[in-house]
Image (cartoon, helix red, strand yellow):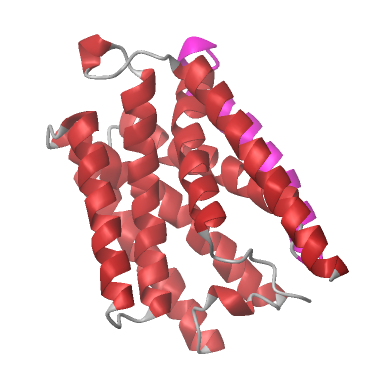
């Protein structure tokens, strides 16, 4: 197989953050505003994710729209997992954050033990890709729990949450430029984009009564999905041109 992960660029990070925001707003819209509830929303989204992930794994190269559709659905399902634990089973955000962190460390440990690398530039075997997607799902679940913990449980609020997580990502970028291991920097930034996107989604969608701007979950989801579609289209055109040259 060719590498199944896109080039790490500004397009990559922009789409990643947008997809995490959609994961937050779309999950809230379907579960609360449509009235499907956490269980039905989780079942539907998990089924769609299974189809998208199966298609992604069967491919032998990177196809932008399939890859990013899988990421968006993983974002929604990851959000649903954390919400189900918190709202459905009353699990503390402190506990869920800790558990997801340990699970993610375990996946990284098993991945490195088997492959001797965590690089996203070498996702060229089925086993590495399975490790990769397991890690991605856990980053979404962990990011959701950590983001809710910071903005709600600790009372930082959406605006301060956006600023905090943006600042942490900037620090990682500067550290990477100064010599921090790229693979470590990538995964740290990847994890932090989830609470950043969740905080941004809540800031835009929630009413001013709850500290938001008041766009609503529908408008926020539609706008961000539209921007994702445009960016994926641009990335696809760039990829086609690179192949032709």
Residues 101 and 175: in front is: 175
| In front of the other: 229 or 91 | 229
Compare residues 202 and 51 and report the one nearer the observer: 202
Q: Main secondary structure of the magenta part?
A: helix
Q: Is 205 or 176 nearer to us in this picture?
A: 176
Q: Residue at x 32, y 64 (%)?
A: 102
Q: Give the position of the C terminus as an image quadrant.
A: bottom right
Residue 46 visible (yes or no): no
Q: Residue placed at 52% from the left, 16% from the top?
A: 218
Question: Residue 129 is drawn in which quadrant?
Answer: bottom right
Q: Bounds of the magenta span?
A: 32-61
- For the point 58% across and 42% down, the residue is 72
Instruction: Check if residue 57 falls in the magenta segment.
Output: yes
Residue at the right extreme of this rendering: 244
The vertical placement of 62 against 50, above or below, is below
Residue 123 visible here: yes
The image shows residue 239, relative to residue 17, as above or below, that is: below
Viewed as shown, does residue 34 lie left or right of 125?
Answer: left
Residue 14 place in picture, x, y as percent: 50, 48
- Left or right, 13 with respect to 148, comes to right
Name the quadrant containing residue 56: bottom right
Where in the figure is residue 46, as x and y percent of width and height?
A: 62, 39
């Amino acid at each position: 197989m060719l590498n199944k992960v896109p080039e790490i660029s500004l397009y990559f990070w922009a789409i990643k953050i947008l997809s995490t925001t959609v994961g937050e707003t779309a999950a809230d819209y379907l579960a609360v505003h449509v009235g499907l509830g956490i269980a039905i929303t989780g079942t539907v989204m998990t089924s769609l994710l299974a189809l998208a992930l199966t298609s992604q794994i069967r491919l032998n190269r990177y196809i932008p729209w399939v890859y990013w559709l899988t990421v968006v659905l993983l974002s929604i399902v990851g959000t649903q997992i954390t919400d189900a634990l918190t709202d459905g089973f009353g699990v503390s955000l402190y506990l869920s954050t800790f558990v997801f962190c340990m699970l993610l460390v375990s996946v990284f440990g098993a991945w490195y033990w088997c492959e001797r690398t965590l690089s996203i530039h070498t996702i060229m075997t089925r086993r590495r890709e399975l490790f990769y997607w397991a890690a991605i799902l856990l980053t979404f679940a962990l990011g959701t729990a950590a983001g809710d913990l910071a903005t709600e449980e600790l009372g930082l609020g959406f605006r301060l949450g956006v600023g905090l997580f943006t600042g942490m990502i900037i620090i990682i970028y500067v550290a990477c430029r100064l010599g921090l291991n790229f693979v470590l920097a990538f995964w740290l930034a990847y994890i932090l984009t989830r609470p950043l996107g969740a905080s941004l989604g809540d800031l835009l969608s929630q009413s001013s009564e709850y500290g938001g701007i008041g766009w609503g979950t529908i408008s926020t989801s539609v706008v961000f999905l539209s921007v994702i579609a445009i960016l994926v289209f641009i990335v696809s055109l760039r990829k086609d041109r690179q192949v032709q040259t």
